Image (cartoon, rainbow, N blue to C red):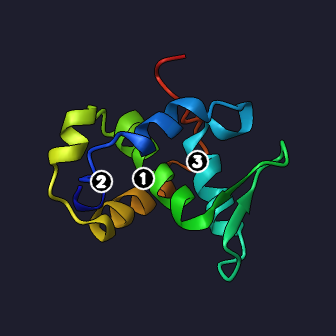
Amino acid sequence: MQIFQIGNGKDEAEFISRQETDQKDLSKNIARLNATNKTKWEVTFTDSTIAPREYYESWTLIQYCINIKRMTYKQILTDTTSEQNVTQEMMKWYEENKSKRTTSYWQ
């Protein structure tokens, strides 16, 4: 995706490191993001840690691409789909699947 062509793997590394129980389920992450006051800069987790909202939005897109679209790191870096299109696709997926558990397939 165009937004992820940085090439340093920071979002992917954060995806792997953020494995608290309440942060593994993509549907819950999207719901948390939607429920967060959009005027605030941060998203707060139940373990009292925070993440910048913009960063958490990107992290959630990475989670969607890895867990749902089954994209590899290389595919994410070389994909030319816009962030807006991936976000729309993810939100459509969310509306269709929000009642299902969507944790990582690596568990």
User: Which quadrant holds the N terminus?
Assistant: bottom left
Which percent across, then down, holds residue 67? 41, 34
The residue under the point 19% across, 60% down is 81
Question: Which mark, by number, is residue 4?
Answer: 2
Say what amino acid the circle numbered 2 marks: Phe
Q: Secondary structure at mark 2?
A: helix
Which of the two discs, 1 and 2, labels the residue nearer the N terminus? 2
Q: Quadrant of residue 82?
A: bottom left
User: Which quadrant holds the C terminus?
Assistant: top right
Furthest-top residue in this view: 107
Q: Nearer the viewer, mark 3 or mark 1?
A: 1
Distance in Å between CA atoms under marks 2 and 3 = 21 Å
The residue indicated by pointer 3 is 27
Question: Which mark, by number, is residue 79?
Answer: none
Dot 1 alpha-carbon crowd within 10 angstroms: few under 14, some 14 to 19, many 20 or more: many
Distance in Å between CA atoms under marks 3 and 1 = 12 Å
Which percent across, then down, holds residue 24? 61, 35
Given residues 87 and 47, the one toward you in this image is: 47
The residue under the point 44% across, 45% down is 11
The residue indicated by pointer 1 is 61
Question: Marks 1 and 2: CB-CB under 8 Å?
Answer: yes
Q: Secondary structure at mark 1?
A: helix
Which percent across, then down, holds residue 90? 40, 56
Given residues 28 and 4, the one toward you in this image is: 4
Dot 3 alpha-carbon crowd within 10 angstroms: few under 14, some 14 to 19, many 20 or more: many
Say what amino acid the circle numbered 3 marks: Ser
Q: Nearer the viewer, mark 2 or mark 3?
A: 2
Q: Secondary structure at mark 3?
A: helix
The residue under the point 36% across, 67% down is 88
Given residues 8 and 82, the one toward you in this image is: 8
